[in-house]
């Protein structure tokens, strides 16, 4: 039988760039802050939004699945993102994916529900600061003005020709999450660092 025990500590896609990202905050006097939020639990959930199971899943998680397009619901450590009419991304603290998966499946019973752990597929870059919207607008075609893309909004879009899930966080001064595929994280990091030069 093959030994499946990890032989090295898990390493995030942008662990090597933590100091370069932090340097932007110092150089911009806080106008831009870039940081990786590694290893967030991420579960892709698909089910009938009009069925009773959608309500049951919300109750089991303690957070309702948002039904309005491109919106976010947050409660405690959990965030649910609307990705499509029957698709959501549930994001939680690192290491909670098995618990979240179990809670969803336990209430699904025989209903057609798909739960896929995509935690290793993406990493999350936090972009905050007074100039965060300006920075992201350089590479994103969405209208990021707060009236159009304010707190509690999300979108699957392109940022610097990279597919991302962009989330406007709802806490004061909390900025944006940029969920990017791990294989594109380094490219996006370099683009963000280059675009931030204007503010340092």
Image (tube, helix red, strand yellow):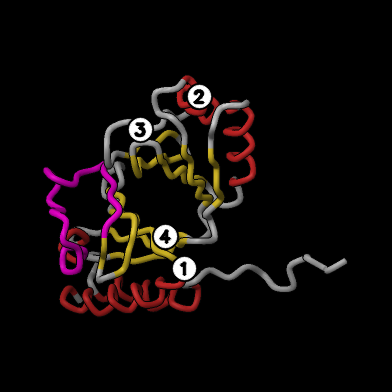
Which of disc 1 and disc 4 is earlier in sequence? 4
Which of disc 4 and disc 3 is earlier in sequence? 3
* Foreground disc of the pair 2, 1: 2
Which of disc 4 and disc 2 is earlier in sequence? 2
Instruction: Tell me the element at label 1.
Output: helix
Bin the neighbour count of mark 2 within 10 Å (Cα to Cα): few under 14, some 14-19, many 20 and up: many
Q: Tell me the residue that label 3 is attached to.
A: 66
> Relative to residue 139, is residue 114 drawn left or right?
right
Which of disc 1 and disc 3 is earlier in sequence? 3
Q: Residue at the location (21% across, 63% down)?
A: 136
The quadrant of the picture occupied by the N terminus is bottom right
Magenta range? 136-157
Q: Is residue 42 above or below residue 37?
A: above
Confirm or deny contact between disc 2 and disc 1 (CB under 8 A).
Answer: no
Confirm or deny contact between disc 3 and disc 2 (CB under 8 A).
Answer: no
Bin the neighbour count of mark 4 within 10 Å (Cα to Cα): few under 14, some 14-19, many 20 and up: many
> Relative to residue 117, is residue 8 drawn left or right?
right
Q: CA distance from mark 3 to mark 2?
A: 14 Å
* Foreground disc of the pair 3, 2: 2
Which of disc 2 and disc 3 is earlier in sequence? 2
Q: Report the residue that reaches farthest toward the top.
A: 52
Q: Tell me the residue that label 1 is attached to.
A: 182
Q: Report the residue that reaches farthest toward the right.
A: 1
Percent x, y for residue 7? 74, 73
Q: Residue at the location (53% across, 68% down)?
A: 12
Q: Residue at the location (42% across, 77% down)?
A: 19
Q: Tell me the residue that label 4 is attached to.
A: 124
Q: How many marks?
A: 4
Q: CA distance from mark 2 to mark 4?
A: 29 Å
Q: CA distance from mark 3 to mark 4?
A: 21 Å
Instruction: Tell me the element at label 2.
Output: helix
């Amino acid at each position: 039988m093959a030994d499946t025990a990890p032989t090295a500590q898990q390493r995030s896609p942008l662990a090597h760039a933590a100091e370069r990202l932090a340097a932007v905050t110092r150089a911009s006097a806080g106008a831009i802050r870039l940081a990786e939020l590694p290893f967030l639990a991420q579960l892709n959930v698909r089910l009938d939004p009009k069925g009773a199971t959608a309500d049951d899943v919300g109750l089991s998680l303690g957070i309702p699945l948002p039904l309005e397009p491109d919106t976010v619901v947050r409660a405690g450590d959990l965030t649910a993102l609307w990705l499509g009419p029957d698709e959501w991304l549930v994001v939680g603290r690192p290491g909670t994916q098995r618990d979240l998966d179990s809670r969803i499946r336990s209430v699904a019973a025989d209903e057609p529900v798909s739960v896929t752990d995509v935690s290793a597929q993406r990493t999350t870059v936090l972009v905050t600061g007074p100039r965060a919207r300006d920075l992201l607008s350089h590479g994103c075609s969405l209208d990021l003005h707060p009236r159009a893309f304010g707190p509690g909004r999300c979108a699957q879009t392109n940022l610097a020709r990279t597919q991302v899930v962009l989330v406007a966080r709802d806490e004061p001064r909390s900025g944006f999450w940029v969920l990017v595929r791990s294989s594109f994280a380094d490219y996006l990091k370099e683009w963000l660092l280059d675009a931030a030069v204007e503010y340092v």
